[in-house]
Image: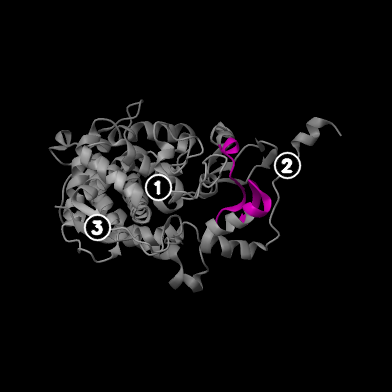
């Protein structure tokens, strides 16, 4: 048999012998533990059969991840992707030229000089939220962090407050909780509809879309639209290169994406940061000293290290549409998803020395390596990465300026799966004193 014929045959990484039903249960319960077990048994590439995502290859090698993210039109976004949850008009649903055009359209409001305006919003929301914090009484930080990041994105998107925004504040948090679970659970039979998160999410999303539709219509008819600088106004005024504009349904899906996906991960990462800092007083002390001196470098490194050691999203993935995708020694056929395990990659001692140690200094004076992937990679890297980083930076600076974060000798909080995202199981508990 010729070499060319041999090369045309699929060559998949080792597959677990665990029955697919048990794989599904393990993946829904905790992908992180399940993938960690298979990594220990099979190495940096293995094959699984998962609910929702079907047959998939999981990789945790930086060079293979780079090959995947640069595979061009041989792959598309994971199937099914978050577009199933966030809508057909969401950037998650788009591919090829449409995806590139939408990214180009949405990038300006989330980058550049507008960040200064957003920084002020973050600081105001942090101070409003923390004004009622109890002193020297332990409480979970994740809910207040999620409220801060939701309020920030609401103000940045709509630029105002009112009854409509109060309604969004009411419906978005439970919708995100249910949607995060629905994204990893297949549609259940009709007889199980009462416990099906997909069914519950659809009802919640319909209410959210109706509310957003009303806001979009009123904004289109706003005589001051040209003067507004909120993200909704910018989207309504934006044009593609051919002069076309986004339709109301597309804008609604993108707004839903920003509201649902744009605050949960940031708020959860902040909760993880507090969980880590309380258990590393030497890091906390250096961070506070830098805040008092007006510096930023060590705080930025601390954010990077939090994202490395406690990634909220544990995988990024692509779907093979070419007849075959070559990744290193493997040849993966059409119809497979390829998942980069961010959690395993961030724990790889070949990429990060002593990965179990929480050590922001590993990021001082150097850019993160290609193995650092909390925002994903390639052309689908999170479009809101700069906005999220700014939020975390300003929130940490403001809180550490106003409060003394009290250390603890409690055990580290375990990882808790919310479906798509991983959070500290006890909500990133903190205790504080006001600084004089």
The one of 173 and 191 positioned closer to us in this rendering: 173
For the point 34% across and 32% down, the residue is 105
Q: Earlier in the sequence, mark 1 or mark 2?
A: 2
The crowding category of the residue bearing disc 3, from other C-alpha atoms within 10 Å (few below 14, some 14 to 19, many at least 20), is: some
List x then y, in percent, for residue 336: 62, 46
| Residue ID for mark 3 | 169
CB of mark 3 within 8 Å of CB of mark 2?
no
Separation (CA) of disc 3 from disc 2: 49 Å
List x then y, in percent, for residue 324: 67, 37
SS at circle 1: helix
Looking at the image, residue 339 lies above or below residue 3: below
Asked which colour scheme the image uses, the reply is one colour
The crowding category of the residue bearing disc 2, from other C-alpha atoms within 10 Å (few below 14, some 14 to 19, many at least 20), is: some
Separation (CA) of disc 1 from disc 3: 27 Å
Separation (CA) of disc 1 from disc 2: 38 Å
Name the mark on residue 22. Answer: none
Q: Earlier in the sequence, mark 1 or mark 3?
A: 3
Question: Residue 350 lies in magenta, yes or no?
Answer: no
| Residue ID for mark 1 | 306
Residue 246 at least partly seen: no
């Amino acid at each position: 048999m010729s070499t060319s014929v041999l090369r045309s045959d699929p060559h998949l990484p080792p597959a677990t012998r665990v029955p697919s039903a048990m794989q599904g249960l393990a993946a829904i319960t905790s992908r992180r533990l399940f993938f960690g077990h298979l990594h220990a048994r099979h190495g940096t590439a293995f094959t699984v059969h998962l609910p929702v995502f079907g047959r998939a290859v999981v990789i945790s090698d930086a060079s293979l991840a780079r090959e995947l993210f640069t595979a061009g039109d041989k792959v598309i976004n994971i199937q099914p992707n978050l577009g199933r949850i966030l809508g057909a008009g969401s950037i998650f649903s788009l591919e090829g030229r449409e995806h590139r055009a939408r990214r180009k359209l949405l990038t300006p409001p989330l980058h550049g000089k507008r960040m200064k305006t957003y920084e002020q919003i973050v600081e105001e929301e942090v101070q409003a939220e923390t004004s009622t914090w109890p002193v020297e009484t332990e409480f979970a930080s994740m809910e207040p962090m999620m409220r801060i990041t939701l309020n920030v994105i609401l103000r940045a998107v709509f630029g105002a407050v009112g009854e409509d925004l109060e309604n969004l504040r009411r419906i978005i948090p439970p919708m995100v909780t249910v949607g995060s679970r629905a994204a990893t659970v297949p549609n259940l039979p009709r007889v199980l509809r009462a416990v099906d998160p997909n069914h519950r999410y659809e009802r919640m999303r319909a209410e959210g879309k109706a509310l957003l539709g009303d806001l979009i219509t009123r904004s289109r008819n706003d005589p001051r639209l040209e003067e507004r600088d909120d993200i909704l106004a910018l989207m309504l005024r934006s044009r593609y290169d051919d002069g076309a504009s986004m339709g109301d349904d597309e804008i609604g899906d993108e707004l839903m994406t920003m509201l649902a996906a744009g605050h949960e991960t940031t708020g959860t990462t902040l909760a993880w940061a507090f969980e880590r800092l309380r258990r590393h007083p030497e890091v906390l002390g250096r961070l506070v000293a830098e805040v008092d001196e007006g510096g930023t470098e060590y705080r930025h490194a601390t954010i990077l290290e939090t994202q490395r050691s406690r990634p909220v999203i544990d995988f990024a993935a692509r779907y093979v549409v070419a007849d075959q995708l070559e990744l290193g020694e493997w040849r993966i056929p059409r119809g497979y998803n390829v998942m980069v395990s961010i959690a395993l990659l961030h724990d790889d001692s070949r990429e990060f020395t002593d990965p179990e140690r929480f050590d922001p200094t590993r990021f001082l004076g150097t850019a993160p390596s290609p193995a650092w992937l909390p925002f994903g990679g390639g052309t689908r890297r999170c479009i809101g990465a700069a906005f999220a980083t700014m939020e975390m930076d300003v929130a940490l600076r403001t809180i550490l300026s106003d409060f003394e974060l009290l250390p603890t000798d409690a055990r580290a909080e375990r990882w808790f799966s919310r479906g798509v995202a991983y959070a500290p199981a006890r909500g990133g508990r903190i205790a504080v004193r006001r600084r004089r």
